[in-house]
Every structure is written in C-alpha cells, then in structure tokens.
Amino acid sequence: MQYQKCSLQLYTSFLIGNQNRYSGIELSKTLGTKTLSHDSVTRFLSNSSYTSSDLWKHVKPLVSLEKGYLVGDDSLLSKKYSRENELAKRQYSGNAHSLVNGICIVNLLWTTGDEYIPVDYRIYQKENDDKTKNKHFQEMLKKAKKRDFKPLYVLTDSWYSGVENLKLIVKELNWNFISMLKSNRKVSITKGIYISVSDLPLANKQVRKVWLKEYGYITVCKLVDKNGDITYLGTSDLALMDYDSFIDHFDHRWKIEEFHRGLKQTTGIEKCYATSAKSQKTHIFASFVAFVKLETARIKEQVSWYEQKAIINRCANFAYLTANA
C-alpha cells in the first residue's frame, strides 16, 4: 500500500481547515489512516528544517518595501499543560500577568494599516543561544534592512525602546521610530538637569522636543485614555510636531496585537503536542505559513480569517445535516 506523505502544503491546509484538534493523529484520521499514516506526520515534523528565513519567500510578494511600518513585539505561546517540552519554560505572560509555561516568540510585522504580514520571527531561548529578546529584535531589523525595507516608522512598546535599539534604528539603519516610553525615562529640557518623562509639563495634545538621556533629541507626547491611564510616546522624527499625526502613526502598533491573537486563534500554533524542539519549530513555522495563507485570502477576497475557517466548518456541517435530515 502506497501511503501519502505529509508535506508543508498539506500540513498548513490542515491547520487552516481544522477547528480545535491539531495533532498528527487527527490529520491521519481526517484523510484516512490508509491514506496518511500518523508516522508520516511525525516524520514531517521531526525531519523538516524550516527556519524563520524560509518565511520570507512566502511573504515577499505581499509587502511593499518602501511603504508602511515595521512593528516589533513578542508573544508567549502557552504550554501550561505540557510537562515535557524542549522549547517551553516558565516565563512572564503579559496576558496572564504571571509566570506561565510557554514558548516566547519575538515577531516583526509589516503593515500599511490594512495588512498583517509577519516578515520575521525568532524563538526566544536565552539558555541555548545567549540572546535576549532585544538582541533578536535587533537582528530582525538588520535583516529587514538587508531586504531593502524603508519603513515610515519602526513601532515598538516600551520593552523595545531601550537606547541600544533606538540608536540602531536611527544611526545605523537610518530609519525613524515611534516608541512607548516608560514613565521613569529620563529627559531634559534644561541642559544637565534630568527629570522623568512623567514629570515633564505637557499640555493636552502637546508635542514637545526634549533630550532623551544617553540618546539625543526626540519629540514626545502623552496619550490619555478614557480611564485616565497615560502612555508616553517618543519619536526620532523631530518634524513630527502634530499630535493627531503622532497618534495616528503610532496606532498602527496595535496591528501586531491583533496579529498575535489571530495567529493563535486560527492556526493552532499553541496546540502542537510534540515535545522535541525540532518538531515544535516545524509546527510554529507551518503555523506562520498557514496564517499568511489566511491573510492573503483576506486581502484578496475581503473575507476575515475567522470567516474563512467558519466556511470550511459550515460546509462539513451542511454535508452532515443533509445526509442525516
């Protein structure tokens, strides 16, 4: 008997079509165990050698190198029920606000405001490669530069707004940033005197030029939400003095939050049951490719990621209901 072999094309289609069971056994049962063996899926996951660099060929046709924004952030893939997993460890989760067993991925997203295109990612595992999240972020930015990206701005939260990152973006890559600033970041409006940015006198919707300690001149503003919470923003673009434009540009940062949610909810990226690092890495890569397929269809057909999956489920339910009416 000639079994069908598992492939990236087949596996990513399975991730898109499935709703809640993403195991190799489920894929084998879906096609029929006489068509695709569970061992074939296991071999595909454990023997493949895809890396984040391989993602580029899938997304390159979707991006415009001289337009849009590059957005950096990380996300934790929960593995709270996985006792043995070579990539997972207990680390802080922003969603849970506590330590969670999981796999941390640092992502770089491209968007003009209408797209969600992951152009690079790194798996954070400092005990193996001695690289911090910021180091991974810097490497991805340098790779984007080599690929000839010319973003309008690089957008980050306060975690990635350290001086080393900001200097890299502006002085080495010749780009501009807009970043969130922690309230205790030191700025100066009088030479030699530093105060926390939270103590800076900023009127409502005011944009002000200041000296950021250890970096240089930036312009800053504060964003006050409906609950009264304040977010401080800084940019290297000294010409960006209009408050509304400042905020409009930075609002594109939230695209990466929506991307993280969509990636988890539509591709089963957190639901690989393999314990080996190599199998987990293959599944993670395949999940990114599956998401890119969903995003490509969303752009072309104006059908959301969630509706695309619902259509598949709807067809299966219709066939079942018709047969059992």
Image (spheres, rainbow, N blue to C red):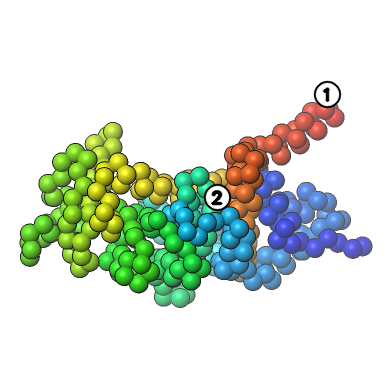
Q: Residues within 10 Å of mark 1 (few under 14, many from 20)?
A: few
At 60% across and 44% down in the image, what residue appears? 299
Q: Position of residue 319 (x, y in %)?
A: 81, 33
| Mark number displayed over residue 263 | 2
Q: Position of residue 60 (x, y in %)?
A: 58, 61
Does 229 sit left or right of 74 as displayed? left
At 81% across and 51% down in the image, what residue appears? 31
**In the figure, 288 relative to 297: above or below?**
below
Q: Amino acid at mark 1?
A: Ala
- Residue under circle 1? 325
Q: Residues within 10 Å of mark 2 (few under 14, many from 20)?
A: many
Does 89 sit left or right of 56 as displayed? left
Does the rendering let one see residue 21? no
Closer to us: 53 or 271: 53
| Mark number displayed over residue 85 | none
Does 142 sit left or right of 215 as displayed? right
